[in-house]
Image: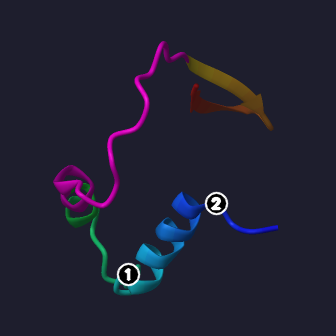
């Protein structure tokens, strides 16, 4: 089965991107790279989002849908 052209383009872009050194990546640097954008086109408009708390082994996990 052939790969969707958009998925193929995404994989090609990932292959050309430099590797991320997670041992040296800081939170502010990562947030700045996300804020700079440009790597992806804007996504679909979000109709709604909900914050959930999921009980797990005596604690709560936060999730956003």
Does the magenta segment cover residue 34?
yes
The 10 Å Cα crowd at callout 1, few under 14, some 14 to 19, many 20 or more, is: few
Q: Which residue is mark 2?
A: 4
Q: Give the image location of residue 28, x and y in percent.
A: 20, 60
Q: Which of 11 and 2 lies nearest the eye of the viewer?
A: 2
- Please name the residue shown 27% across and 55% down the image: 34
- Please name the residue shown 64% across and 60% down the image: 4
Split into 4 quadrants, where in the image is the N terminus? bottom right
Of labels 1 and 2, earlier in sequence is 2
Q: Give the image location of residue 39, x and y in percent.
A: 30, 61
Up-down relation of residue 7 to residue 12 (above or below): above
The 10 Å Cα crowd at callout 2, few under 14, some 14 to 19, many 20 or more, is: few
Up-down relation of residue 49 to residue 34 (above or below): above
Please tell me whether the stretch drawn in magenta is mainly helix, strand or loop: loop
Q: Give the image location of residue 27, x and y in percent.
A: 28, 61
Up-down relation of residue 60 to residue 22 (above or below): above
- Please name the residue shown 34% across and 86% down the image: 18
Split into 4 quadrants, where in the image is the C terminus? top right
- Which residue range is magenta in the image? 32-50
* Disc 1 + disc 2, Cβ < 8 Å: no
Does the magenta segment cover residue 5?
no
Q: Which residue is mark 1?
A: 20
């Amino acid at each position: 089965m052939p790969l969707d052209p958009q998925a193929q383009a995404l994989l090609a872009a990932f292959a050309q991107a430099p590797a991320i050194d997670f041992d040296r990546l800081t939170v502010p640097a990562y947030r700045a790279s996300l804020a700079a954008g440009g790597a992806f086109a804007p996504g679909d408009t979000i109709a709604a989002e909900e914050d959930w708390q999921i009980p797990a082994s005596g604690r709560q996990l936060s999730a956003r849908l």
